[in-house]
Image (cartoon, rainbow, N blue to C red):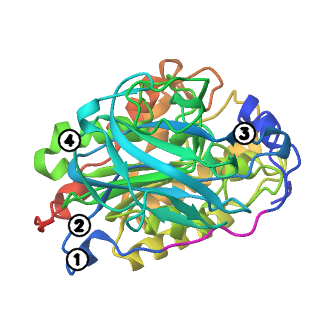
Amino acid sequence: MKNVSPPASAEGATRRALLKSAPLLAASLAVPALPARAQSGSPVRWCATWGAAPAGPPPSGSIQTYSGQTLRLIVRTSIGGNRVRVRVSNEMGSTPLRIGRASIALRSSGAAVNQASLRELRFGGAAWVTIPARAPAISDPLDLVVPAQADLAISLYLVGSAQGTTLHNAALQSSYVSPGGDYTSTISMPVSRTLSSWPFLTQVDVNAAAPCLVALGDSITDGQGSTMNANRRWPDYLARRLQASLGAAGRIGVVNRGISGNSMLTDYPTALLAGYAALERFDRDVLAASGVRFLVAFIGINDICYSSGSNPIPAAELIAGYRQLISRAQARDITIIGATLPPFEGFVYYTAAREGVRRAVNDWMRASGEFDALLDVEAALRDPARPARVLPTYDSGDHLHPSDAGYQAIANAVPLAPFITSGSVVDEQPG
């Protein structure tokens, strides 16, 4: 690639903040896990019902510091179960993260939870856990009836001073920070401020004998341009569509591993909230997702936009990257669905040369048949009268990121055949 730093306004105001200088962090910890079909020896089959990709640390001047406070983090399930566990991450931290107490509950409204559903989370039998730098921690399983399409509230009481170095930045979901104190068992938690990110929390699993689909991508998968607090990212729409359209076969956990600003091939040391490149984070964000059996790979437009406008990255380099994703997914018996790159004429970093690369990549995806299936995002979003542009109804306004209607159009274009022909329903196991 010709440029080593992404353009400051490519992702809007968030991207401008990301481009401030920040320390280079060591490579993220990869914790591979077996795919769903390899879990037959375990008494419980775990499936991720929600997930976000950790990134960071933020620029030093933007790091949030919590001082003996409780975070109440709100997430939306895709499928349900009757047991649950959570994954908490300090993978981008440089010092231990001390959690004094934690809980999980169904959210009723705002920062309030349903009292009957409130459960204490434990770690190795203890009510507290210290997570070393660059490591995650998984809570002990507990009994809790978790419905599909429900809001969960995970509360973390942070002991002493804790820096929010590991987080998913663009949550598009309000979460809550308490005044000082442990409010993990409080029904209506007092709120000192709200958050639009997810610090530390990266996954929620349920004991569903079901497969998981991971959506690996950038800001379009992250949902930039969609309505805040409405769960209108395309993976959200897809989870609802699978359940509505396929009956039992549609009971598939959907995990969103999109990161705004992410690329497939290149890391940006001055923009660590854009995450490590998809090829680097693949093991952690795809293979380590509980029950993973399907992958939608929708990545690459930033590799084009962040390269030279007149002499952009060659399509062959991107194609080599896609082939690596395909090989690594298929080696783990994961069905991989490729996604064509969206039209972007009118976007601030559109040039004819970059458009040529995008078209070449899409032509290869359609002609090669190397993915197990294809999600044709370009065909779903383009304006028939101006095919290089997003249809106005589907445009959030910047000519790249879709509107709510555009995100629904992407979800509606996902082929259903892979979920039917693969036999995605898994026999129940005790537990």
- The mark that comes first in sequence, 2 or 4, is 2
Q: Are marks 2 and 4 in contact (CB under 8 Å)?
A: no
Q: Residues within 10 Å of mark 3 (few under 14, many from 20)?
A: few
Report whether residue 239 is seen.
yes
As helix, strand or loop, the secondary structure at mark 1 comes to: loop
* Residue indicated by mark 1: 42
Q: Nearer the viewer, mark 2 or mark 4?
A: 2
- The numbered disc on residue 45 is 2
* Residue indicated by mark 3: 64
The vertical placement of 53 against 225, above or below, is below
Q: Please indicate whether residue 191 sits to the left or right of residue 155 in the image.
A: right
The kind of residue tagged 3 is Gln
Q: Are marks 2 and 3 in contact (CB under 8 Å)?
A: no
Q: Quadrant of residue 333?
A: bottom left
* Rendered residue at 37%/43% (across/down): 104
Point out the stretch of residues depicted in magenta.
Answer: 25-31
Q: In which quadrant will I find the C terminus?
A: bottom left
Q: Please indicate whether residue 394 sits to the left or right of residue 205 in the image.
A: right
As helix, strand or loop, the secondary structure at mark 3 comes to: loop
- The numbered disc on residue 243 is 4
Q: Is 229 or 323 nearer to us in this picture? A: 229
As helix, strand or loop, the secondary structure at mark 2 comes to: loop
Q: Are marks 1 and 2 in contact (CB under 8 Å)?
A: yes
Q: Please indicate whether residue 49 sits to the left or right of residue 385 in the image.
A: left
* Rendered residue at 35%/69% (across/down): 334
Report whether residue 12 is seen.
no
Q: Residues within 10 Å of mark 1 (few under 14, many from 20)?
A: few
Whether residue 26 appears in magenta in the rendering, the answer is yes
